[in-house]
Image (tube, grey):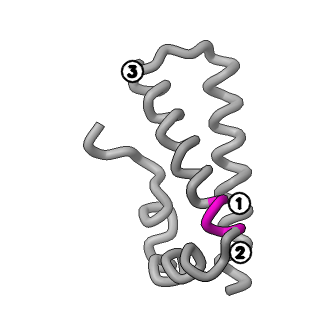
Amino acid sequence: MSNTPHELHEEFPDKAGKIHALKVENAHFARLADEYHTINREVHRAETGVVPVDQFAETELRKKRAALKDEIFRMLEKA
């Protein structure tokens, strides 16, 4: 698992500076980013079969990741 797709810096490469700044300055953003990172790793482990999960659980993880990504994007746009 050397490369986990969908990391925030890959999803928003033009906003790397804002991501770092908000993680330092905004506790809510930092929590969202940490949660996104955790969920993203879970999705990756499910997709690669490292941790077997049923299809429903994997779909729910993907939905949660998408919702977090949307909220993070909104915060990045406002910053």
The x, y position of residue 42, in whole percent, is: 52, 34
Residue at the image position 70 percent from the left and 39 percent from the top: 63
Snapshot quadrant of residue 34: bottom right
Q: Which residue is mark 3?
A: 50
Q: Residue at x 53, y 83 (%)?
A: 21
Nearer the observer, disc 1 or disc 2?
A: 2
Image height check: is 78 above or below 33?
below
Amino acid under label 1?
A: Asp
**Mark 3 is on which residue type?**
Val
Quarter of the image for the C terminus: give it.
Answer: bottom right
In the depicted structure, whether residue 18 falls above or below residue 44: below
Residue in the picture at 69% in, 19% down: 56
Q: Position of residue 76 (x, y in %)?
A: 65, 77
Q: Secondary structure at mark 1?
A: helix
Q: Secondary structure at mark 3?
A: loop
Q: List the residue tagged with mark 1.
A: 70
Magenta residues, start to end: 28-32
Sort mark 1 into few (<14), some (14-19) or many (20+) by Cα contacts within 10 Å. few
Q: Is residue 34 above or below residue 79?
A: above
Q: State how far apart marks 3 and 1 are (Cα).
A: 27 Å
Q: Which residue is mark 2?
A: 75
26 sits left or right of 10 in the view: right
Query: Which callout, 3 or 2, points at the residue further toward the start of the chain?
Result: 3
| Distance from the alpha carbon under mark 1 to that under mark 2 | 9 Å
- In contact (CB < 8 Å): disc 3 and disc 1: no
Task: Verify CB contact (< 8 Å) between mark 3 and mark 2.
Answer: no
User: Main structural element of the magenta stretch: helix, strand or loop?
Assistant: helix
